[in-house]
Structure formats: C-alpha cells, structure tokens
Amino acid sequence: MERLASIDIGNDSVKGFLGDFTNTIYLPNVIAELNERSIVEMEKDPLNGLHVEITSSALNRKNGRFAIGKLASKYPNNDELTPDQEKSQSDQPLIMLLTTLAYDAVQHFPEKDGVVEATYYLSTGLPLDETKKGRSKEFKKKLKGSQHEITFLKTPMFEGKVVQLKFEHVLVNTEGFAAYVDLTTNNDGSTKNEELIGKTILINDIGGLSTDSAVITSESEVDNEYSDGIKKGVSTYLDNVIRRVYTEYKYTIKSRGDLVNIITNKDPEEQYHIWVAGSRQSIKEIVDEELGTLAKEEYKLIKDLWRNVPDIRYSYQIGGGALVLKEHLNEINRNDMDFPLRFISEEDSIWMIAKAYFKILLMYIEAKGIELQEPTMANE
Ligand SMILES: Nc1ncnc2c1ncn2[C@@H]1O[C@H](COP(=O)(O)OP(=O)(O)OP(=O)(O)O)[C@@H](O)[C@H]1O
Ligand SMILES: [Mg+2]
C-alpha cells in the first residue's frame, strides 16, 4: 500500500499535496528542540501542536525531539533556515519533510499496536544552485536508503503513535524548472499556455530567503549557464519592517504573515495601516522603503539576465515575494526597460512548485505503468 505526495520545502514554509490535488498542507518552516512539553492547554488541531521524535539515518544528528511549525514559533530557541544553509545538506528540511508525511500517514495508513507503516511515492525538489552541484542524487539516496521513524509526542489526537516511513520512489526536481512544468501542463498532463512552448522564458521565484532565476530554453530545458540565483528573499525585508514599526510605534506585528495581510489588504482604508491605541497609523513609508530596496535588487537581476539572454520573451515572477513586490517591480519597470513582466494569481504564486511536483509524479507513475494500491482505513 502506498500514497503519493509532493512536497516543496520552502525556506519560509513547506507546501505539499498529499494523495491528490485537493489535499494540501502548509507548514511554517520553523523547528525548535523540545524534549518535554508542559501542557497548559492542548491545541485542538494537531497541525498547531506538532511535537515529534525523529530517528533517521538520513539526519546528520540521527535523532531528536522537536516542536514543528506553529508550535515551534512559540519557543524562543526556534530555528528558521538561514541563506547559507543548503537544503540538501541540513537536517531542518528533512525534519520538516518527514513530519509532514508522518502527519499524513497517521491519518491514511492502518495502524497496528500503535505503529503505522507507510510507503510513499515522493516528488520533491531542490533549488537550482544545489541541483547544479549534483546534490539531487545524494538527497534522493538519503531519503530512499534510510529508515525513518517518527513518533508523535505531545501532539493532540496522535500522541504516542509511531510512523515508520518508507519511500518506494523519490523524484528530486529543480524548483525553477518545476514552475515551468506547472505553467505549461494541466493537472491531467495536457498542455496549457501553448504560446510559451518553444520560447525562451525566465522564471523568477522570489522566495523567503532566496531568489531563483531559471532561464528555460526554447527546447524546454533549464539553461545551466545563465540560470542563476541570489541569496536574497523577502523574509529579511519583512522582518526589517516589523522591527522598524515596533521602534516607531511600539506596536508588534506578530508575524510575517500578518504583515503580508496588512500590505495586501484589499480595503484601502486598512491597507498599509495599523491601529495604535485607537488611532490609525500608516506604515506605508517604511514598507515602501524596505520593499523598494529589494525590488531594485530583483530588477537588477532581471535586467542582467535579459542582457545576457536577449531572446527571453517573458519573465514570470512567482513565489510569495512576487506578490508583495509586484507594484514596486512594475513601477521600476515602467520607468526603465518596460520588459514583458508577468505575474500570476496569489494562489499559484504560492502553490505552483508543489503542484508541479505532483503533476510530475503523476506523469512518472503513468509513464512507468505503476498501479497504485492506496491504503484504506477501517473507518473509511
Ligand atoms: N499570500 C501571500 N501573499 C504575499 N506574501 C506571502 C504570501 N504568503 C507568503 N508570503 C511571503 O512571501 C515570502 C516567500 O514565501 P514563499 O512561500 O514563496 O517562500 P518559500 O518557498 O518558503 O521560500 P524559498 O523559495 O526561498 O525556499 C515569505 O516571506 C512569506 O511571508
Ligand atoms: Mg519557494
């Protein structure tokens, strides 16, 4: 028995499709070492209270006990990824991935004496600079060739359950190329956006900590020579805004997500505003200054690429960063080169890579003629 899963291990958040295109998961990429948890009040939703022990030979440290996601962000010693860490070399991406799958497995595979044995076909990926260095093979080997055991500790509903994870197959894609696949294929594998095929396209994925720029050639391949990335993403600039707003107004914006909601609020009365002691204050100047700085860097990257590869026809901006930088980039572009920049929907900007991984997995399953035997739970 096995299930399909696609997981985009973002520096800011993990996005995944589990089983099919309708079942998604979104977890902030935060972990904290946590042995014991003194519980004042148990969360209702297990996703908000993920506390696990992981034993896996794929981890450099082999074993550990962690709070994951929302729960981890409540602990002061929590870890978020930093730009100098490679996804393929660090433990944190694996810890996130294994926990995500264990969370799916306890809900979809049968359990015997508290133990759940689960097998997955997994489609995931790495950023361009890591796949360029040939990291995909070892990353795949770490997952496929290892034993992974995830025990739920003080997690609501799942406490005490043990998941033994196995991978029947692991696809390690390149993030930027995956975005291209999503742009050009429907869920059923048929072609969409036909006008893009045969043209050189630039895909800029503006993520939390990095920006990946994939040049896709007219042969629908990644151009390894010109594709590039910078270790800059939007999280740092959002954090700057949060810090400056606190200094100026003694007002704490609780998370990047809350700030993004303030920036993108559709109601013009609320957009760019906070309420301090009953009075409405604009934070637009701070936001514009910070995001404007990043937008300039991003635009420079786009310009350099277009200079090196003049036959690029369109540049697509994707990732959460594209959403908050859209206006700034368009403004700079209007006054400069007037490139054909394209932006996609909010939902696609965030989910595109994970969705692409799932599409690629379905194509693989079909091409290999694999017949899946999906697990059934006694109560399903
Ligand atoms: N709906 C949204 N609208 C605007 N910004 C968002 C939205 N969701 C997330 N963001 C912000 O965009 C940034 C990047 O998010 P994204 O999910 O693209 O990064 P990631 O994939 O986790 O990171 P990376 O691609 O660098 O590994 C984050 O700082 C996040 O707070
Ligand atoms: Mg990303």
Image (cartoon, rainbow, N blue to C red):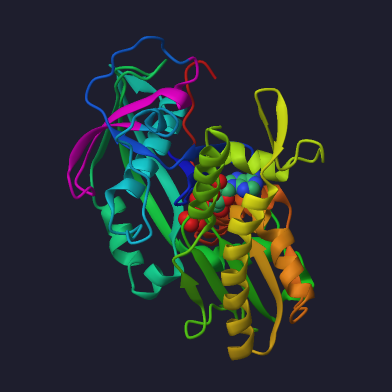
Residue 198 is one of the magenta-drawn residues:
no
Quarter in which the N terminus is drawn = top left
Q: Is residue 179 above or below residue 372?
A: below
Q: Residue at x 55, y 59 (%)?
A: 360
Q: Is residue 18 visible?
A: no
Percent position of residue 68, x then y: 37, 33
Q: Residue furthest top?
A: 40
Q: Residue at x 70, y 23 (%)?
A: 278
The quarter of the picture where residue 307 lies is bottom right
Say above or below: 375 vs 172. above
Give me the residue at 62% from left, 65% from top: 295
Q: Is residue 334 visible?
A: yes
Image spot of residue 335 (x, y percent): 77, 76
In the rendered image, the vertical position of residue 122 relative to residue 150, given as above or below: below
Residue 294 lies in what quarter of the image? Answer: bottom right
Q: Is 59 situated left or right of 354 in this image?
A: left
Task: Choose between 167 and 272: the one closer to the eye.
Answer: 272
Magenta segment: 44-67
Q: Is residue 57 magenta?
A: yes
Q: Which percent across, then down, holds residue 38?
A: 29, 14
Name the spot of residue 286 as percent of width and height, x first.
62, 51
